[in-house]
Image (cartoon, rainbow, N blue to C red):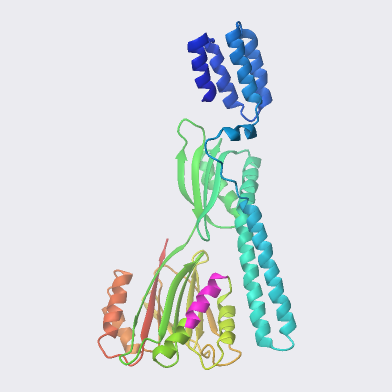
Amino acid sequence: MTLLTLFILAYLCIGVPWVMMVIPLLISIFQKDKKSAAVLILALGIYTVKDIASTSYFLFCLALLAIKKEKLKGLCLQEETPVINRFQDQGLLKRQMLNYASIFQSLASYYAKMSSEESELLKTMAEALRYNADVISKADSHYKDQQRIVTALEGYQYIVDDFLMEEPKAGYLRIVMDISNIKRGEIKTTLKPLMEALLHRNLEMDEIHNRRFLNGFHICMSDAIPFHIDALADSVKNAFTGNGDSFSVFRFRQSMVCMISDGMGNGERAAQSSQLITSIFQRMMISGITQDAAIKCINKLIQSDTFATLDVLCFNYALGVAYISKSAACPTYLLRNHKIYEINGNALPVGIVSIMQPDCFSIELEDGDEFIMMSDGIETHEFYEWMRERKADTLREDVEIFSDILKKSQRKDDSTFIIANITKS
């Protein structure tokens, strides 16, 4: 644009030939290959330069082509923002986390002979730090994966004009690409299976569009999530003291986690116990510690006169599996194909003994599944009353009907429930 403006001024003032307007176009096309641009400009100048005015303009263009980009920074009105090397910073963070993990592991080995409880706790923290370091590595590897995939696609003789791989939501991958010399039929039969093999994950086609005025297609792919999961909860306190139950429903990467904790007894003391357990458990899950290991770790952390039940239901979207962990928790009910299945366990509450093992189950999800989690304040007949009265139109309506049933009578104990619906995506 600068050269074009100078050309117009030169043409109006000193009569530079119109053909010299090709020079800005050549510099724009060959902005990275300056040698080719210089050769073409010299060839053009031999045939067009006839007077001092055109010669001056021609030499000025060559001089501007020779100036390095770095030399022009001083001409900018605004100071450029320094570019931060994100990959270098994340690499440093990863090394630091691995070093901290090694420190915890060394301490765990040191305390192994003195106290198995402290040793196991330190070992769990070391594993959590390593997990987060791996997460950082996966984030760093996105750029390398893009280069690897583009190279593989070009090996199949596809011309990749544009390629973007992003993670708009944690654990959810989206790919946008523009590819030439590919037929529409090849996209689903060849390109999609090839991308799944390169990324080791199931993908689905979101968009396929012809590129206007260009050859090829604009293609969008994303992770194939087999199920959509909704969960809502409510709690009705007892009639005498504060609510000692705590519950939480949260999403983390490709999972949804539902949990209920019932502190032993009633009132503030019970609430402190249950809130402590749910808060620590949620942070451990987000840090990458598995359900089983997190429950065992919490058990060692709070082992004293503080104890509570813990009921955990973790849905994995990508795998289509529900993982259940129970520590002295009430039964979880699964409604499937008009049948009721009861999932129960016999494990002790969290914090009551030094070594405990929660009851763990895994269930493959099916379209239309419904899970109901409850604390011990809810009677069995109240659950079946809800089954008779529920409309099953929306999840929120089902929750409201259950809450209304619980509020009919004076509650002797805190009553908490979570309802989760599974539908096929």
Q: Based on the picture, tell me whether residue 277 belongs to the magenta stretch.
A: yes
Magenta stretch: includes residue 197: no
Could you say where residue 77 lies in the image, as x and y percent from the top left? 52, 35
Residue at the (67%, 59%) spot, across then down: 92
Where is the C terminus found, in terms of image quarters? Answer: bottom left
Residue 53 visible, this orientation: yes
User: 147 or 192, which is in the foreground?
Assistant: 147
Q: Residue furthest left?
A: 408
Q: How many marks?
A: 0
Q: Is residue 97 left or right of residue 163?
A: right
Residue 122 x, y percent position in the rendering: 66, 79
Residue found 67% across the figure and 78% down from its top: 123
- Residue placed most toward the observer, 65 or 374: 65
Quick one: which residue is furthest to the top in this view? 50
| Nearer the observer, 106 or 84 | 84
Magenta residues: mostly which secondary structure?
A: helix
Would residue 357 be seen by someone viewing this image from the given angle?
no
Residue 383: quadrant of the picture: bottom left
345 is higher (above) or lower (below) than 29: below
- 93 with respect to 243 (left or right): right
Task: Pick the residue in front: 138 or 379.
Answer: 138
Q: Position of residue 65 (x, y in %)?
A: 63, 24
Above or below — where is 236 with respect to 398?
below
Range drawn in magenta = 276-287
Residue 138: x percent and y percent? 62, 58
